[in-house]
Amino acid sequence: MTPLDSSSTSTWRQFYALTKPRVVQLIVFCALIGMVLAVPGAPSALEIRLALIACAGIWLVAGAAAAFNCVVEKTIDAKMKRTAWRPTAKGELSDRQALAFSAVLCSVGSAILYWTVNPLTMWLTFATFVGYAVIYTVILKPLTPQNIVIGGASGAMPPVLGWAAMTGDVGPEALILFLIIFLWTPPHFWALALYRVEDYRKSGLPMLPVTHGNEFTRLQVLLYTFVLMAACLMPFVYGMSSWLYLSAALVLSFGFIAYAWALWREYSDALARKTFRFSLIHLSALFAALLVDHYLF
């Protein structure tokens, strides 16, 4: 490989890093769950094709939102160990490059969704872009310690996007999935913020552990896990799922509550990390259980 080839590969890797691949993968996974649940029984070849196209469009717009976020928060990112590696924070990519990249991804993704899926999915996805990249990142995040709660609406939209892609509307089932992610986001993110509190203090962001302290935040994490458990039972109560999902939801919810309870009783950074990691397992396994239940019962 020539030095020019190596430089080009490195640049593309930097652009790819702007899309926050792990976050976007979770977004697309949650959108896919919405698509699958919206289709009774096994999907047809046309429905599979539609779902793949919708996933591609949602991935592009979500990546665009992530890239825009990296530009807006580059100064803050540079102060935090967790985000200092980002190309915009390190100055490896200019604002113009990152914004142009974001604009291209958003335009292409929106066009795919509008012309090959349906206009409703495109507008909902674009609204999610604005909600995350502008309302949350620019306005809420530096303004209030409740930024995660309010801004969590954008992060909870993927199942709704998936449902809309397959049906052309937004049903109550999609709103239940939205509610689960919406209530999952605060305890998930505050567990991270607890052991990254010094990073957030240096950044100047009014995150809950910074503004209200460790003990108050731990209590909020615990309380949210109880409310989240109630939301996790709603697919069964509404008739979306059977006892298989109910069993998984109960085990996962009690597990999350157990971690939150232990964290509230006696804090340690190690336990906060474990709680954060379990929250990822909780959401992924919960939706996987919905998927398995959908096909088996």
Image (spheres, rainbow, N blue to C red):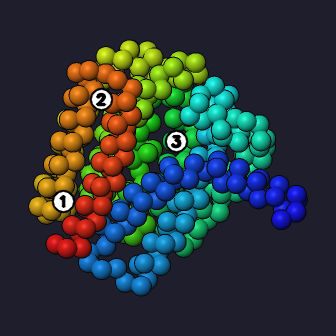
The correct choice, above or below, for 11 with respect to 295 in the image is above
| Residue lying at 73% horizontally and 46% vertically, measured from the top left | 98
Q: Earlier in the sequence, mark 2 or mark 3?
A: 3
Mark 1: secondary structure: helix
Residue 230, placed above or below residue 33: above
Q: Where is residue 178 in the image (x, y as percent from the top left)?
A: 33, 49
Specify the label residue 132 is tagged with.
3
> Residue 46, how many percent across, how many down?
43, 83
Q: Mark 1 points at which residue?
A: 245
Residue at 60% x, 35% y: name it.
83
> Could you say which quadrant of the image residue 92 lies in?
top right
Which comes sooner in the sequence, label 1 or label 2? 2
Would residue 164 be visible to someone looking at this image?
no
Q: Which residue is drawn at 59% across and 22% down?
A: 203
Query: Cα distance, mark 2 to mark 3?
Result: 22 Å
Looking at the rendered structure, the kind of residue marked 3 is Tyr
Left or right placement of residue 257 versus residue 73 in this view: left
Number of the label disc, if any, that sits on residue 95: none
Element carrying mark 3 = helix
The residue pinned by badge 2 equals: 221
Q: Which of marks 1 and 3 is nearer the N terminus?
A: 3
Quadrant of residue 193 within the rendered picture: top left
Q: Quadrant of residue 274?
A: top left
Label 2 sits on a secondary structure element that is helix
- Mark 1 to mark 3 CA distance (whole Å): 30 Å
| Distance in Å between CA atoms under marks 1 and 2 | 24 Å
Q: Toward the viewer: 120 or 220?
A: 220
Q: How crowded is mark 1: few (under 14 residues within 10 Å), some or many (20 or more)?
A: many
Pointer 2 local density, CA inside 10 Å: few below 14, some 14–19, many at least 20: many
